[in-house]
Image: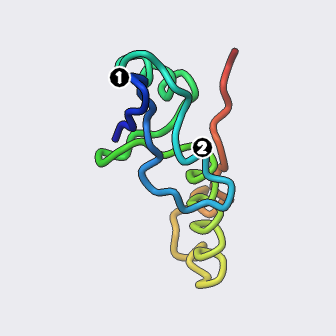
Amino acid sequence: MFLEKDDQYSVICHTRIAENCLKNGEWHESKEEAQDWVEDECWIFSGEGWICLNCNTHFMRNLSKTRRDKELNSMLPDGWGDDLEVGINTVR
């Protein structure tokens, strides 16, 4: 979950699946600071590790595409057939 290099820490992206994956977050002097950074940047904790926003976007686009390709929208309750949201709107 953490990389350590030269007494600095960075959180690793758990999936590393998107072409533009960040691979890891910024470097900090402690694990706590590194984790605070990914939380502030809205990375997603999967229960197994942190996922960067680029990988999350990749997953969400693939979910939407798979659902459309398999024509699963018609099986969903009313209102659930809308396109999945990609990304997280943040307030800064």
**In the rendered image of this protein, does residue 28 appear above or below residue 10?**
above
In what element is the residue under mark 2?
A: helix
Q: Which amino acid does label 2 sit on?
A: Leu
Q: Residue at x 67, y 59 (%)?
A: 82
Earlier residue among tags 1 and 2: 1
Query: Seen in the image, is 17 located left or right of residue 65?
Result: left
Residue 22: quarter of image: top right
Residue that badge 2 annotates: 53
**In the rendered image of this protein, does residue 82 appear above or below residue 9?**
below
- Residue 83, horizontal then vertical, whole percent: 68, 59
The image's colouring method is: rainbow
- Per the rendering, the mark at residue 31 is 1
Q: Do the numbered discs 1 and 2 sit on residues whose CB atoms are within 8 Å?
A: no
Q: What residue type is labelled 1?
A: Lys
- Residue 31, horizontal then vertical, whole percent: 35, 22
Q: In the rendered view of the protein, which quadrant contains the C terminus? A: top right
Between 9 and 61, the residue placed more toward the observer is: 9
Select label 1 or label 2 by which is in front: 1
**In the rendered image of this protein, does residue 79 appear above or below residue 44?**
below
Residue 8: quarter of image: top left
Q: Which residue is drawn at 66% across and 49% down?
A: 86
Q: Residue at x 39, y 40 (%)?
A: 45
Q: In the rendered view of the protein, which quadrant contains the N terminus? A: top left
Marks 1 and 2 sit apart, C-alpha to C-alpha, by: 20 Å
